[in-house]
Amino acid sequence: MVAVFPQKHLTDIAEWHRMGEAGIFPPESRLELIEGEILTMSPIGFNHAGHVDRLNRIFAHLWNQGVTVRVQGPVQLGDLSEPEPDLVLVKPDTDDYTTRHPNAADVLLLIEVSDSTLRFDRTQKLRLYATHGISEYWIVNLIDQCLEVYRQPQDGDYLNQSVLTTADSIDLVALPALRVSVAAILQTDRRKPL
């Protein structure tokens, strides 16, 4: 008798979109397509949601400068992945991304807010973003109250990795004139966010 092992069925972006259009997943589902696998994501807690709202408020003024701010919207990475990062700054699009999702070339900054997902965001998501050339990836680490910054993607990792505390500020690679206070992100500084 020949041994039969369970096999994983991987899906691609086209099949993923067809399943969504067919209503296969309940509307309240929190799902992401990561490297061909459909993953159920953790429910969003109060602290997580509040930090995403804070990030949105910090970066909202960039709309006036032609930068699109997307909150928990899909980003297409190749044919097998469509994560929904907590916040992404993307280049402007003539139709405001109504005919496609942004891809890696559109991304200026990608941010994940992490509490229960910290390990996943530091490993699988980091590898995914680096592999697809996301130039700057931040993890707002709610467990250790710090900002993890990843830059210079190469071979599925980031050559430049740093951890910033509430005493620090950071300039974005794609928007060097913009300086962001880590204290404003983590809300230890009640002053104006920028």
Image: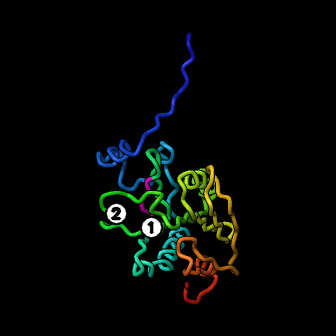
Q: What amino acid is at disc 2?
A: Tyr
Q: Dot 1: few (<14), some (14–19), or many (≥20) neighbours within 10 Å?
A: many
Of 177 and 119, nearer the camera is 177
**Residue 167: horizontal and vertical position, in percent?**
70, 81
Q: Dot 2: few (<14), some (14–19), or many (≥20) neighbours within 10 Å?
A: few
Q: Would you name the residue on which mark 2 appears?
A: 97
Examine the image and state in which quarter residue 96 appears: bottom left
Q: Is residue 13 left or right of residue 129?
A: left
Q: Would you name the residue on which mark 1 appears?
A: 90
**Residue 127: horizontal and vertical position, in percent?**
60, 51
Of 142 and 101, nearer the camera is 101
| SS for callout 1 | strand
Asked whether the residues under the numbered discs 1 and 2 touch, taking CB atoms below 8 Å apart as contact, a structural biologist would say yes
Q: Residue at x 40, y 46 (%)?
A: 13
Q: Residue at x 43, y 53 (%)?
A: 76
Where, quadrant-wise, is the N terminus in this rendering?
Answer: top right
